[in-house]
Image (cartoon, rainbow, N blue to C red):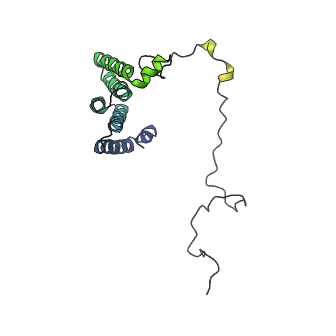
Amino acid sequence: MGNLDFHLDDHTGARAHLATATAYGTRTDDARLTAWALGAQSMVARAENRYATALSYAERAVAHAPAGLPKAQAHAWAQLTSLAGLGREQEADTALAAAARELEADPVVSRLAASGSTPPSTPSTRPSPPSPSATTTAHARPPKRPSRPLPWPPPAGPRPPWSSRRPRHPPSPQTPLSGPSTS
């Protein structure tokens, strides 16, 4: 919910949900949840230009994150971006190097590397944008249709017999709720 709130630009809701997730992660000794929630709190703080607070959350995320991919994510997603926002370039480079080391040490990433595959968007292997000549019209998105606003308020009148929607408003007190009256 905290991530959704953040993306819906509800930072107050995001902070509340992410604090709850951090508390649950801490209480249940779930290091991944705790690290992720702290990293997400760092993301919210960065979006609000509170870089010192973001770095504090990021450092806690790195401390809680288990080795491998979760720690690499905490370094790259939370710590690196917070340090960059504070203009601390050398420390940001150190965080990037730490993320790359953690990623290389992760057993899943190691198996992918041994098989010749690489995980998408890792700090050490960023995909390059396609060249203009490589783009074909077969992969182009269809043009966006113009949107029509829905009528509001909804039109009054009887519903079609195939409509399964419930009435828009609860019945009034004068409307009997069940069967014929027995008076």
- Closest to the observer, 156 or 112: 112
Please identify the quadrant where the N terminus is shown: top left
Task: Name the residue at 38% across, 22% down.
Answer: 103
Left or right position of 15 against 149: left
Please identify the quadrant where the C terminus is shown: bottom right
- Closest to the observer, 132 or 30: 30
Q: Position of residue 4 (x, y in %)?
A: 45, 41
Left or right position of 162 against 126: right
Is residue 170 in view? yes
Is residue 126 in view? no
- Closest to the observer, 55 or 117: 117
Q: Position of residue 5 (x, y in %)?
A: 43, 42
- Closest to the observer, 55 or 126: 126
Compared with 24, 103 (above or below) is: above
Left or right position of 45 against 132: left
Q: Residue furthest bottom?
A: 183
Based on the displayed image, in which of its 4 quarters is residue 138 positioned?
top right
Compared with 174, 82 (above or below) is: above
Task: Name the residue at 37% across, 29% down.
Answer: 70
Q: Position of residue 111 (x, y in %)?
A: 45, 21
Based on the displayed image, in which of its 4 quarters is residue 86 positioned?
top left
